[in-house]
Amino acid sequence: MISPTSAGIVALAPGVHHACGLRDGQVFCWGFNRGGLLGVGEPGLEEVLGPRRVPGLERIVQVVADYDYTCALNDAHAVYCWGDNDRGQLGTGGTDRRSAPTLIAGLNADRLIAGYGRACAAVGAGFRCWGSGELGDGVERHRQGVPLEIAALAGVDDLTLSDGHACSLEAGEVRCWGHNASGQLGNGEGGCRYEREPCPHSRCLPPEQCKHELLPVRAVGLPPIVELHAGGSFTFARDASGKIWRTGQQGVTMDFGADNPNYRPQVIEGLAAMVELGAGASHACARTAAGELWCWGNNAFGQLGHPPGPRGGREAPSRVEGLRDVTALAVSSYSTCALTGAGEGRRAWCWGDNGRGQLGDGTTERRHTPVPVQWPAAGE
């Protein structure tokens, strides 16, 4: 038995080709199940087209999903992870894939943050992180399989991790590090340059040197920020008045370090005051206090909530029609999800890429408008 009603659900966590949700203290996952990625058993099953409960987890208060793994936090502060582990992203001390939730020994977390091959847990006034990538202390880690305290993140209020860069938020100030070819760090620099002159007629191109920062740099020109999301080659921030700011540009230019306006934070025009923000690989969404949802950016998969244009290119903010009383949103690389209503009337909706069943509507059909996630009946 299935139902679009999702009373009891409190959160959605879309990855890229799979997604998970939290209902009544239990985790449900759906979509691509390669090697048991969903943690629901049956590792030989390639796709799960609707939410299925992840066994062995109770009293869960947070779930986070990324490209190839998922982690959950329970009310006793214990952390469980499952999925791919080639970069140490499960925090288990090795690199073996896990098709069932596996406890991270010795970790007592307050909150989880996931991002492309690495994850972090807020522990008191600091962060412990694991996996592969840069964490703001100037070190490039590879297969850091156990949680490690990151001194550079001590005192940070929030953290956001993308595939090539990351940002922290402390006392309203944004600092970012990592790739900066598109100016996504917001420090007024960016771009790439060739290491030597290209061949005549561009028949061969030499290696590029692109802007990159190992240590955090301050994003310039921003008012006090209250919410922060890194996605693809962009960073999005919400200030205390509800304005949304963007750093980064579409594509990479060869004006290495030039004072390009796109290398500095800019306000997203055409939006009212927003109370929540989310960002994917190349699109973003935000909601108002009145429950309206607005999205902008790339719409190649219909992730903005309407059919893509003839070229599927970047689009200005527009309201997602057909949704009322939006109470929460969750944005993945190429899809978008939202919760509407409350109590017995609460429902979960998703739209965009669905090639692996990651929208949870029982199909693998791409959706250009919101469709309800088909939850199993209570107790199943």
Image (cartoon, helix red, strand yellow):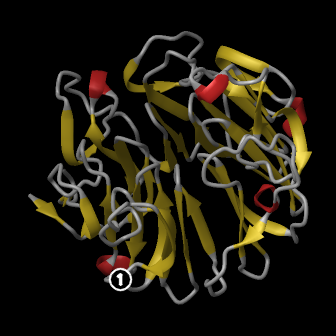
- Outermost residue toward the front in this view: 200
Q: Position of residue 200 (x, y in %)?
A: 65, 24
Secondary structure of residue under mark 1:
loop
Q: Nearer the viewer, residue 4 or 175?
A: 175
- Outermost residue toward the left in this view: 1
Work out whether 143 lies above or below 353. Answer: above
Q: Position of residue 117 (x, y in %)?
A: 57, 28
Residue visible at 45% across and 51% down?
13
Residue 155 visible in the shown view: no
Residue 356 visible in the shown view: yes
Residue visible at 48% across and 84% down?
292
Work out whether 321 lies above or below 261. Answer: below
Q: Position of residue 338 (x, y in %)?
A: 41, 68
Question: Relative to residue 99, is residue 248 drawn left or right?
Answer: right
Work out whether 84 lies above or below 189. Answer: above
Question: Relative to residue 152, is residue 231 drawn left or right?
Answer: left
Q: Amino acid at mark 1?
A: Glu
Question: Relative to residue 234, is residue 214 drawn left or right?
Answer: right
Residue visible at 32% across and 44% down?
29
Q: Which residue is mark 1?
A: 321
Residue visible at 58% across and 86% down?
289
Question: Relative to residue 262, is residue 71 drawn left or right?
Answer: left
State the image quarter where residue 47 is shown. Answer: top left
The quarter of the rendered structure image containing the N terminus is: bottom left
